[in-house]
Image (cartoon, grey):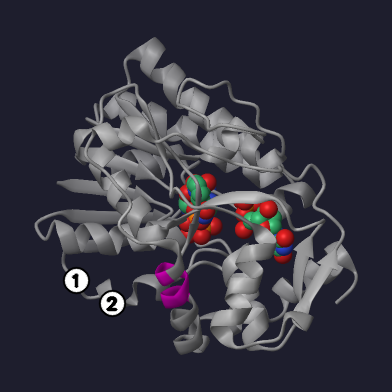
Amino acid sequence: MRVLVTGGSGFIGSNFIRYVLTEHPDDRIVNLDKLTYAGNPANLADFEHDARYAFVHGDIADAELVGDVARGVDAIVNFAAPSHVDRSILDADEFLRTNVLGVRVLLDAVRTLGVPRLLHVSTDEVYGSIATGAATEASPLRPSNPYSAAKAGGDLLALAYWNTHGVPVVVTRSSNNFGPYQYPEKLIPLFITNALESQPLPVYGDGLQVRDWIYVLDNCAAIDLVLRAGRDGEVYNIAGGHEVANATVTREILRWLGKPESLIQMVADRPGHDRRYALDATKLARLGWAPRYPFASALESTVRWYREHDAWWRPLKSGDFRAYYARQYGRR
Ligand code: NAD
Ligand code: TYD
């Protein structure tokens, strides 16, 4: 299979490319990535000289470029997106441009070039906060922050192109990922790297917000399965099946690192903070998928990865990153 991966230099995309080239050694991948602050060529340094892999620097909203790189591929898998809720609260512009208009460009390319499949990577956040039970693929979308609203726009547009034009799309909506190569602005890598530096761990609000965590390789396996076996026009939830409060994750990270709980700093809540996400992934299970990585051991190996790869994350935590957080919370 010849696959165009977009946003492949980020966290999940780079893990996905490594997963596909390992599991399907005959596949070929072209990675189109804009290399925003979150895109890092170092994430795929091991494939730099691999003839099965090619990198193209560019934007999914660039229709001419997308037309060039998408010609002749068997499928497109779209990971490209600004992905951090806190940044979308500060400025939503780039979120709408890439997550809605960029998706539109990909859909039109698939339509005009006759690409056989577009897998669009969406998120559980499009369902919004869920007090009890779990969202199925038929649940209403109630996104409640600029990031999730933009993701819902791209997700619904993909389904609209299937309905209107017969464009062959499949959509995945996964829960919160963690694992190696995640930019140290998201909860788990931020807290691991802060703890390693004996810096405060800023827990928003009361810390009792619940997320359903999935190890990134479980998500990659699910996306790969949906890519090859999913049905056109369908949505597939991908759930880790491990719901846990942020305060609990925080204490577990400190415990794995042997660091004191006095590093926990309760800070002002995120505006519009969703209380709980929960997914029903029965439909994906029927396709033959089940998560393979238990949360506790996956968290332990993630902590170990960051401990052993400080040359990867230290440069990312200087300058812009610290200034950004200082501007937002003014406490550090
Ligand atoms: P990330 O921020 O680590 O990586 C995003 C990548 O997209 C970067 O390499 C960036 O350079 C690239 N990119 C951004 N805008 C682009 C553009 N206009 N054109 C080309 N490339 C562009 O994000 P991630 O955590 O790997 O998430 C990947 C996808 O998975 C996103 O669509 C996100 O919404 C979705 N998702 C993430 C999670 C999670 O927990 N991280 C959960 C569910 C869904
Ligand atoms: P995050 O990793 O930003 O993912 P998302 O908002 O997409 O779920 O945040 C996960 C949870 O952790 C969320 O409830 C917000 C919370 N959080 C903190 O308490 N402190 C932090 O510094 C960050 C980044 C997140």
Q: Which mark is residue 46?
A: 2
Residue 280 figure quarter: top left
The residue tagged 1 is: 50
Q: Are there few (<14), some (14-19), or many (20+) residues within 10 Å of tag 2?
A: few
Left or right of 162: which side holds 315? right
Residue 71 visible to the viewer: no
Quadrant of the rendered image holding ligand 2? bottom right
Dot 1: what SS?
loop
Q: Position of residue 15 (x, y in %)?
A: 35, 62
Task: State the quadrant of the C terminus.
Answer: bottom right
Between disc 2 and disc 1, the foreground one is 2
Residue at horizontal 82%, vertical 47%?
271
**Please, what is the dominant secondary structure of the magenta stretch?**
helix
Left or right of 94: which side holds 207? right
| Magenta highlight range | 297-302
Q: Position of residue 231 (x, y in %)?
A: 25, 25
Residue 29 figure quarter: bottom left
Q: Nearer the viewer, residue 42 or 23?
A: 23
Q: Amino acid at mark 2?
A: Asp
Q: Position of residue 54 (x, y in %)?
A: 26, 62
Dot 2: what SS?
helix
